[in-house]
């Protein structure tokens, strides 16, 4: 991943609508050399929810918002596999779901039946 991509990720704000390209997540990145070529690019877009992870950082990309207020269905994309990212609509949530901006805490779910969900706790 180039330094400019990392800088772009660091500049993203919670709620931005983004578009990105990343390498196939089925690859085991622990076995890949530092500078590898991505053979199967994946294109994704959604709402930027943040970057999380202790050992391996993952970008959280919100795809849909079920009626349960605290949960988002989201992709977890390994940051080292992202090779392009851009903001499509800055402040997207501000315009369309303003109540979603008062974030208190973001927690990844670990149970298999809730795997694609990201819990976003909101301030009152």
Image (cartoon, rainbow, N blue to C red):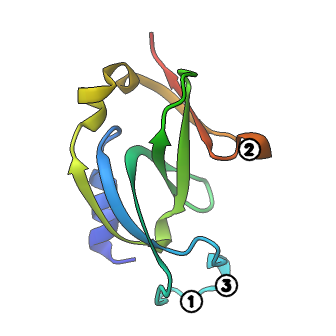
Q: At numbered mark 3, what does the secondary structure look like: helix, strand or loop?
A: helix
Q: At numbered mark 1, what does the secondary structure look like: helix, strand or loop?
A: loop
Task: From the viewer's side, name the closer residue of 6 and 48.
Answer: 48
x then y, percent, for residue 69: 53, 21
* Residue marked by disc 2: 110
**Which mark's residue is nearer the viewer, 3 or 2?**
2
x then y, percent, for residue 78: 53, 64
x then y, percent, for residue 111: 78, 42
Instruction: Compute the Cα span from label 3 to label 2.
Output: 24 Å
User: In which quadrant of the rendered image does the C terminus lie?
Assistant: top left
First in residue order: circle 2 vs circle 1 = 1
x then y, percent, for residue 80: 48, 71
Which residue is painted at 54% across and 22% down in the image?
67
User: Mark 3–mark 1 contact, CB under 8 Å?
Assistant: no
* Residue marked by disc 1: 33
* Residue marked by disc 3: 31
Q: Left or right: 87 with respect to 21?
A: left
Answer few, some or many: residues within 10 Å of disc 2's Cα (few below 14, many 20 plus, some between 14 and 19). Answer: few
**Which mark's residue is nearer the viewer, 2 or 1?**
2
Instruction: Compute the Cα span from label 3 to label 1.
Output: 7 Å
């Amino acid at each position: 991943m180039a330094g400019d991509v990392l800088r772009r990720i660091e500049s993203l704000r919670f709620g931005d609508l983004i578009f990105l390209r990343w390498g196939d997540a089925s690859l085991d990145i622990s076995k890949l050399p530092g500078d590898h070529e991505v053979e199967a690019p994946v294109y994704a877009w959604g709402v930027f929810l943040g970057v999380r992870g202790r050992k391996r950082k993952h970008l959280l990309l919100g795809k849909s918002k079920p009626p349960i207020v605290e949960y988002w269905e989201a992709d977890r994309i390994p940051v080292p596999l992202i090779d392009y990212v851009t903001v499509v609509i800055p402040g997207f949530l501000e315009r369309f779901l303003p109540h979603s901006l008062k974030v208190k805490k973001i927690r990844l779910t670990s149970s298999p039946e809730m795997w694609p969900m990201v819990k976003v706790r909101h301030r009152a």
